[in-house]
Amino acid sequence: MAFLEMRQITKRFPGVLALDRVDFSAERGEVHAVVGQNGAGKSTLMKILGGAYSDYEGEILLDGMPVSIRSPKDALTAGIAVIYQELNLVPDMTVAENIFLGREPTKWGLVDFRRMREEAAKALAALDKTIDPEAKVRELPVGKQQLVEIAKALSQNARILIMDEPTSALTEAETQKLYDIIRRLKEGGTTVLYVSHRLREVFTICDRITVLRDGRKVGTVRVAETEPKTVVAMMVGREMEEEVAEQVSVSATPAVLEVRDLTLVDAANPQKRLLNAVTLTVRRGEIVGIFGLLGAGRSELLLTLFGAPPGIVVSGEVRLDGQPVRFRSPMDAIKAGVGLVTEDRKTTGLILTMTAGHNISLAALPFFSRFQWVRRRQEEQAIWSAYERLNIQPPMPFMPVVNLSGGNQQKVLLSRWLLVKPKLLLLDEPTRGVDVGARAELYRFIRRLAHEEGVSVLFASSELPEVLALADRLLVMHQGHIVAEFPPTAPEEHILLYATGGHLAAASS
């Protein structure tokens, strides 16, 4: 009997069956990967085990005994700790305070800080003796913050450690150190459940792999008895084809955007490269799609081209219409004819307290201004024209933008850039949170914008079907590199193999 068993786990969200009678098991002292495409259900399954979701069907057993896990406290009591991709630390508290947050040792009714520091030092000793328990967490690089999370889990006597995309923010050296720690945990009998998109990591550190697809378990395989292309075939639902994808033929239209050896280094952590020698070209009227999984560098690339990333050291060359450019701010990019629709429209795209119409005209105000006065009639005419062109509903431009549906909010963002008539439009996750009908409308509009009006479009998406449906040419990113180029007719299995790093795993094996 397995150390951990999850039987017939079913989880429903409104209108969605996220998990459908999933069985999962893991042995004591095993590193077990859970993989699948976006939306496969892997994070949902792990959140149930970690107590984040209470309303699920099925049962969980540890050492053959049923356990009730309906809250994070239940999970900790059962010896299950979770390290989420977004680290759950308080930056302005010390390392020791974070490790013992909510369960501080006491003496005479007061927090015993001396004992807390000593116990924290013991927990850290097995991981990294250089981490000072009295240091503020914000002073540590991300790799050491990750170790603080692990120390926190170990101090709770965790028998099962869930790691969700643990290397997405780590450098290669930090990743190798994490591997060493996982191996030591395994030798000590800790079971590690490893959720990752990166097959190279999975084949490096894991013993077994469970594949989920569309909320169902496809199967479990041993790493020593399989290969990356087999796992990819399980993820996408069909066998891997051996044919080599043909290179796309490039149009004879002139290049609008040329990027050569673009490299981004985190100023706070010079060893960490967010982008590494990225080279690409986008021609007039062309739609180029960038596909990559979480942490691939898609958003960082678009933000850099728009002049937006803070705390980053940039090197390489960017040319617009053949002329070298270096945008110091988004305003420079806008003046040069570049627009950006950001990934998170509510946080970095829209001003929710403003009307939809004023959100549309925001970037184009200089066109409607004279002597610092806005010509309201001209502005309103442009807003109404954008409403008609994109069929924004309801046709009430002076209602608060927060009251619009997700699809119509996305249309408002696109309309903003139409008013400034860009030569290059950058789109980050262009249909995130958009319903099926609005998505089809946006696809038609983007195609018309590029193919009929000559606007160059570079867009990034983590949804492979979207990239295949919209792009004239497809670039694949993995860990800050562009690793492959495909036409949109290429098999999904080939594209996903490169996006997950499976091609590196296959080469190294």
Image: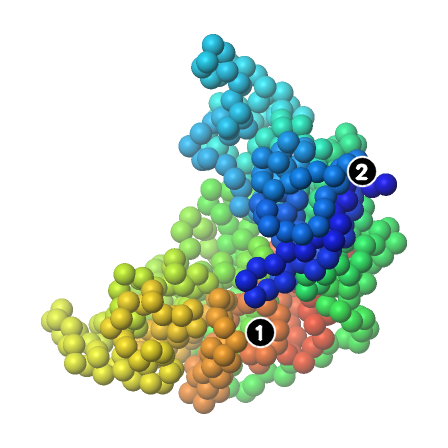
The label on residue 64 is 2
Give the mark nearer the N terminus: 2 vs 1.
2
Q: Residue furthest bottom?
A: 452
What residue is rendered at 45% in x and 89% in y?
Answer: 452
Q: Is residue 342 left or right of residue 148?
A: left
Q: Quadrant of the C terminus?
A: bottom right
Q: Is residue 440 left or right of residue 360?
A: right
In the rendered image, the vertical position of residue 95 relative to residue 243, given as above or below:
above
Q: Quadrant of the N terminus?
A: top right
In the rendered image, the vertical position of residue 356 relative to residue 121, given as above or below:
below
Tell me which amino acid carries mark 1: Glu
What residue is rendered at 62% in x and 70% in y?
Answer: 464
Q: x and y percent of residue 340 in the render?
A: 41, 68
Q: Which residue is mark 1?
A: 466
What residue is rendered at 49% in x and 58% in y?
Answer: 300
Q: x and y percent of residue 337 in the render?
A: 36, 74
- Asked whether the viewer can see residue 294, the reply is yes
Q: Nearer the viewer, residue 295 or 330?
A: 295
Q: Nearer the viewer, residue 381 or 292?
A: 381
Q: x and y percent of residue 80 in the render?
A: 66, 36
Q: Secondary structure at mark 1?
A: helix
- Disc 2 and disc 1 in contact, CB within 8 angstroms: no
Q: CA distance from mark 2 to mark 1?
A: 44 Å
